[in-house]
Amino acid sequence: MARCGCRTCSTVRLSSWLSSSAWLWGGPVVEPALSVRGLTKSFGGVKALDDVDLDLLPGEIHGLLGQNGSGKSTLIKVLGGFHASDRGTVELSGRRVKTPLAQVADHGIAIIHQDLGLVGSMSVIENIGVSDAYGGRRARPIDWKRLKADVLRIFRRLGTRIDPDARVDTLNPSDHSIVAVARALWLLSLRATQHIFVLDEPTAYLGPAESGRLLDVMRAVAADGAAVLFVSHKLNEVLSVTDRCTVLRDGRVVTTRPTEGLSAAEMVTLQLGRPIDDFYPPRAAEPDGSVRLVAEGVSGAGVDDVSLSLRAGEVLGITGLVGMGQDPLAEMLAGARPVAAGTVRGPDGGVLRGGIRAAMGAGVAFVPVDRKRQGLWLAARGRENLTLPTLRARRAWTPISASAERSAARKAFERVGVRPVAPDMPVGSLSGGNQQKVLMAKWLEFKPRVLILHEPTQGVDAAAKREILALVNASAEAGAAVIICSTDYEQLAATCHRVVTMRDGRVVAEQSQPLTERDVLLSCQGATPHGGLAGSSEIEGRA
Ligand SMILES: Nc1ncnc2c1ncn2[C@@H]1O[C@H](COP(=O)(O)OP(=O)(O)OP(=O)(O)O)[C@@H](O)[C@H]1O
């Protein structure tokens, strides 16, 4: 049964109602907030959406699932007016609307993308205030006093204590998402009575604790009567928060059904059209190689006196609650961020100075967390992205053979499961998960001696996640030393030989095999495994 974890919500969950006879025999007795019929959209020869029907009911949290490239983002972009559909109709509360929709907020629709569109140097309240009337014909002054009262009321309803006057760049990532939801709530409250929230992988960058806060916010929004569409590859979250799910495969709806009674394995089978045996590949063999990377007393922005070493063949996890220093540490080890004190020694024992270029020269590869801004050249072809890391090693003026590049890229894309395998397609036209696979292919092809991965499977579906991690393990078995910097505790426990935990910039714990998700989470929360914090609902819900 879909569980309501919201402490303030006393409403009856929709799940039992949805599976009741009222739904089954007579169709929905409640007017859908959004009703889509026959939606079809192609890009060239690719049918991204094929005759899609979808109903979102007021008060419901509806999961939208599907493997990478199945059409989820395209559906959202059509709803958001970003793409015109080729065919199909959209009704809002029973009223047919003209598509593509313009000014979707006027129709009560808020779309919250992964990139939240907040301005870090502005306060929370300024970010919310400037969202009204942006692009409008008449400028009018913002009533800050009234706005602040509205925002505080919304924050109270969402159960958050974010300071409206705080600068956004001082907040943690889950607060960013909550501010984006609050901004949408405020904006919609000025414009429409029925609200529809579409959240496109809002928890992709969040750890379990931070995600939990956002899921509570979604529950509060739905409890007030909004319809919520939630896109995620994190099946635990989909199971815990949604009332119903719609599964897309190759642009078509496979099923829409109540979440109650569904398991994560069944969700994967519905998405792929086949079951997968295990969510994770077998762990890489125990390492017995020589030392490949050493950090000695490394300090810098957000990192305080960290020492660690890593051997060839080893897969080391670096984790912590979100924002505890693991992200800047991964960047410092890769030469992508300056080290203020201490040293990093590379595969040959020499101190790595000279930034990321010197690190690459020593065989260190880095897969950054922000694939769109730091990882990929979105306007370039897939094959060109793959060539980039080796460009410097080529002899000057040696022409690049397009056909050789194409055939190498085709093989690399097949290895990591990029769909479609189209080396000439601009990377920006691929789905988000497939972009992530191209990024992985780019650095695996580099044949690194040290491979530093920052959230390597974000936004990828269950099958692709398994394939990517299998390649990471193969890379370790071929002699690379691997670091996975992540807040996906389950993935770390299933993949790593060793996990170090950071808090306030320092390494505070180190665990080796046997590892469990629970132990990793406990160490992040400051408890010793098998002790303390026994009452944490976060842990109990997932154990
Ligand atoms: N602008 C575009 N140009 C060409 N093809 C596109 C474009 N946008 C999407 N596609 C294609 O449409 C299909 C559906 O992509 P979409 O982004 O909707 O998938 P998705 O389900 O959101 O995947 P993911 O889980 O990876 O985010 C894919 O084959 C993708 O390559």
Image (cartoon, rainbow, N blue to C red):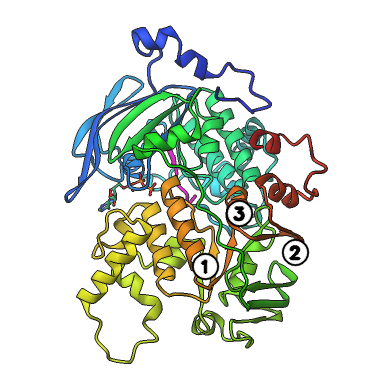
Q: Nearer the viewer, mark 2 or mark 3?
A: 3
**Residue for point 36% across, 82% down:** 391
- Label 2 and label 3: CA atoms lie apart by 16 Å
Mark sitting on residue 492: 3
**Which residue is found at the position 70% from the left and 40% from the top?**
161
Q: Secondary structure at mark 3?
A: helix
The magenta span reads: 110-116
Q: Residue furthest right?
A: 532
The image quarter containing residue 133 is top left
- 478 left or right, relative to 302: left
Residue 381 in sight here: no
**Residue 112: within the magenta?**
yes
Q: Which residue is mark 2?
A: 507
Secondary structure found at label 2: strand
Q: Depth check: 66 or 446 in front? A: 446
Tell me: residue 88, above or below residue 521.
above
Q: Which mark is residue 145?
A: none
Q: Is-magenta flag for residue 506? A: no
Identified by mark 1, the residue type is Glu
Q: Earlier in the sequence, mark 2 or mark 1?
A: 1
Residue at the extreme left of the image, as rendered: 45
Q: Position of residue 24 (x, y in %)?
A: 38, 11
The answer for how far apart the CA atoms under marks 3 and 1 are is: 17 Å
Q: Is residue 299 above or below residue 90?
A: below
- Residue at (48%, 45%) from the top-left corner? 131
**Residue for point 55% across, 25% down:** 2
Give, as a three-letter code, the residue at label 3: Leu
**Direction from residue 111 to residue 291 in the image, left or right:** right
